[in-house]
Structures are given as structure tokens and as C-alpha cells.
Image (cartoon, coloured by chain):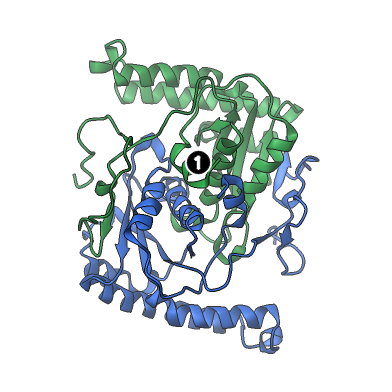
Chain colours: A blue, B green
């Protein structure tokens, strides 16, 4: 697959076929992840691959519980069962159905990767630059080999138990940052939906239009009505 | 260029030819950046492209000063002129020469991109997942089109002046996260050097070896002696 095409067509995949991922493919995906940059080439990123080992079973159970805890709270908080969410086939109702299925089944994904980071200083937005590019590489490499995944925070609600389950050192400088299920997608990759590029790319100064920043033909846009007002 | 090859060969490029980047290529690079994932597809990332506009001139001046401030402090703090750093052609001396050249000239790079993020909540490591994948996409797309760049924090020392210079809103929820120079590399891309994959990829549990995690033939490794002891 072409690099630029891969960048434009890697989208969140939340339904997986049960087929296992061959180890050769896993090796290529994880190798690509570890080629990512990090400040001073420190490479503080670590990846724990969960398949069907003993610790993986326990970790999957905890992560599945975490997923449902987060989704059930979000479902209520964001009113997924009210308004258009109660209307069959509305975007909101479809997202709710997707998330319901995802959080019920994600712990069965062929592979779940946990991404961790050694924080040599207080973790903040900038230190994220030492791990998120590696996570993105992982998702892109998976796409290149016909797999899909999605970044989740399902480790959040079960953090202490999960760390104990996988034998992660009890040191706050090791942070778990992402839980990424991977597998062959059910259905196809489709194309990503984003804001028009003109809304997010500026030239010379803030909110100054970049006349050359044009979405290529066939680009699909975020359907959620008007752009989010970030100035509220 | 093949996606997996691109992931494995995108390395930090710190010397640029003076050739401008055609607008069509800029559009493709920025488009790829904006295809990245973000939590709830919020797309809070923003990119300001600096070329030769009026504000860009002032921003370049400030960023150049920031680069030199940071490098001069690091040079002293990390003893780049002592020990092996004083030995001609040692890795340390070569890195010092590279950084000296880079921080003196980076403000002249054909394009400098500033990456910003709308922080809908307190910024932390996890929120970085909303902007760093886009930054990585940007670097990968540049690689795919024959350009190179590197993630820097040169905006750090001049943050307030820089924000004023580009007209960024005086709202702490808008955070500048990265300064990325881009251009055609002087010389070639070379291959990245990283730790052996077995040091960073585990299976089933923390620090449990993943027997399938093998570096492909020809992989080049970090030359900085023994792996950093992250448990100190």
C-alpha cells in the first residue's frame, strides 16, 4: 500500500473477525511502531502484546470491564438514548450501536496492545510526543497489512488491577497510555471523515486562510453539523 | 513509497536544501496530517504554516532565538564539550556539530509548521493522543514526497512573543505543542537507529519476551552503548 494512501485511509476499526494475527505480521506491526521518533531518541515507549496467554486472559477481563464502565457512563452523560439518539439510524443511534457492540466484544479482539511510556519527567502534553507517534505508526502498519484497530482508554477504570495483572512495575514513572485492539476488520476500511482542511490549516498567522489547503476530490467530511465552537 | 517502508525510514532531518516546497505538496502533507485520529473525532489540532509572510518572518526570528537558547543550555548541561564530546568525530561531537548547525540555520527552513491543540480539558499525556498522531502523519507524508523534518520544542523559550506574533488567541486552552521545520534533505534519509525490538516489545506480561519480535535483517541499532536503565 502507498504511504500517502495509507495515511488517508487509516480509520478507527471497532469490529474484528476472529482470525488470529500471524506472528510475522505482528512482528512487522510492532517493528514499525518502534521506528517512531522520540525526544533525544530516548525510546521510552513499551508495548505489551496480549493474545491468549495466562496474564492476557486476566487483562482482557479487566479491560472489558473498563470498556463497559466508560461507555455506560458516556451513554448516559452524552444522552445517547435521548433526542436523535432515540431515532433509529440517526448518526447518534448508529454510534451508540457501534459502541455497544465494541465495548461488549472488544476484549475478544485477536490482539490487544498496551502502550506504555517511561516518564523521565513529569508527564504532560509535550511528553506525549514520545509515545503517540509510535502508537500512530502501529495503527498505520496494521492498516498496511490489512488489519485495523483503534486507540482506547479502556485501561483507565482498572488501572491498578491491570498493572498488577501484567506485572508492570509499581512505579508512577511507567505510565500506561493506550489500549489498542487489533484484528481483521469486519467490512472494509472505508474512508475517514474529518473537518474541511481549511478549518484546521492556516498560513502565516492564526486563522489566516491557506489558499492552497484544498481537500482532494472525494474527501468525506465530519457529518456532525457545524464545526465545534472551540471558543466557547 | 510503500507504507511500511515509509514508517521504517522516516528519520529526523535537520539539514534542508533551500528549495521551496510547492503548494501542491504542502497541501498533500497537511491533508495527511489532518486525517489522523483524535478522541471522539474532535479534531482539536491546528497547523500554522510559516513560509515568507510578514508574520512568518517575525516568528522565524523568535523560533531561531528559542532554538539557540535551548541548545546552548543543553550543550553545557549535558557536557557536549567535555569527555568524548571533545574528541573529533565521536558520536557526541558529531551530534554537537549537527545541533550547532541545525539551531543556527533551522529558522531558514523552507517551511516551518507550528502544531497546536485545543485542550477541552486539562492537558496531560493522554490528551497528547489528540495531536501527536497528526504530527507523525505530517512527517510521514513529507517523507513520502521526498521531504524531511523533525519535531522540536523551539517555541518553548519564546512562547508568549510567538503567540502574539502569529495572532494566536490568548487562551491557555489553545496550546502550542510542536515546531516542525520541513524541507528537502541535504544528503539522504538514511535509516533510523533504534533499540532492538526485544527491548521494547513484550508478550503477555511486562518484560516477558515476545519470541516473534525480531528485527528484520539490516536494522541499525542505537549506538549509545548499553540500553538506558529506566529503573534507576
Please indicate, yes or no, whether residue B172 appears anywhere in the rendered image.
no
Q: Residues within 10 Å of mark 1 (few under 14, many from 20)?
A: many
- Give me the chain letter of mark 1: B
Report which quarter residue B55 is drawn in. Answer: top right
Spot occupied by residue B147 in the image (x, y as percentages of width and height): 58, 31
Residue furthest right in the image: A211
Residue identified by numbered label 1: B6
Against A187, residue B89 (above or below) is: above
Camera-nearest residue between A128 and A183 = A183
Q: Which quarter of the figure has residue A204? A: top right
Q: Position of residue B141 (x, y in %)?
A: 59, 41
In front: A22, or B37?
Answer: A22
Does residue B137 appear to the left or right of A149 in the view shown?
Answer: right
Which quadrant holds the C terminus of chain A? Answer: bottom right
Within the image, what quadrant is residue A160 found in?
Answer: bottom left
Depth check: give the residue in front, B193 or A68: B193
Task: Note whether B183 is above or below A1 in the view shown.
Answer: above
* Image side of residue A126 versus residue A117, left or right: right
Classify residue A213 as left or right of residue A152: right
Q: Position of residue B137 (x, y in %)?
A: 56, 46
Amino acid at each position: 500500500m502507498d504511504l500517502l494512501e495509507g495515511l488517508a485511509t487509516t480509520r478507527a476499526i471497532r469490529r474484528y473477525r476472529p482470525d488470529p494475527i500471524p506472528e510475522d505480521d505482528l512482528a512487522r506491526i510492532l517493528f514499525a511502531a518502534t521506528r517512531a521518533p522520540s525526544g533525544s531518541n530516548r525510546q521510552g515507549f513499551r508495548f505489551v502484546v496480549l493474545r491468549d496467554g495466562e496474564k492476557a486472559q486476566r487483562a482482557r477481563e479487566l479491560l472489558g470491564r473498563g470498556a463497559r464502565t466508560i461507555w455506560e457512563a458516556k451513554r448516559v452523560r452524552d444522552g445517547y438514548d435521548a433526542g436523535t439518539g432515540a431515532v433509529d439510524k440517526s448518526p447518534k443511534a448508529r454510534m451508540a450501536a457501534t459502541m455497544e457492540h465494541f465495548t461488549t466484544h472488544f476484549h475478544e479482539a485477536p490482539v490487544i496492545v498496551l502502550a506504555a511510556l517511561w516518564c523521565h519527567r513529569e508527564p504532560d502534553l509535550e511528553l506525549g510526543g514520545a509515545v503517540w507517534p509510535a502508537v500512530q505508526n502501529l495503527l498505520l502498519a496494521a492498516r498496511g497489512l490489512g488489519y485495523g484497530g483503534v486507540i482506547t482508554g479502556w485501561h483507565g477504570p482498572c488501572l491498578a488491577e491491570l498493572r498488577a495483572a501484567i506485572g508492570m512495575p509499581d512505579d508512577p514513572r511507567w505510565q500506561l497510555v493506550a489500549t489498542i485492539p487489533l484484528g481483521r476488520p469486519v467490512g472494509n476500511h472505508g474512508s475517514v471523515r474529518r473537518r474541511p482542511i481549511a478549518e484546521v490549516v492556516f498560513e502565516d498567522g492564526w486563522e489566516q486562510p491557506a489558499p492552497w489547503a484544498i481537500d482532494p476530490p472525494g474527501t468525506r467530511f465530519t457529518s456532525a453539523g457545524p464545526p465545534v465552537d472551540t471558543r466557547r
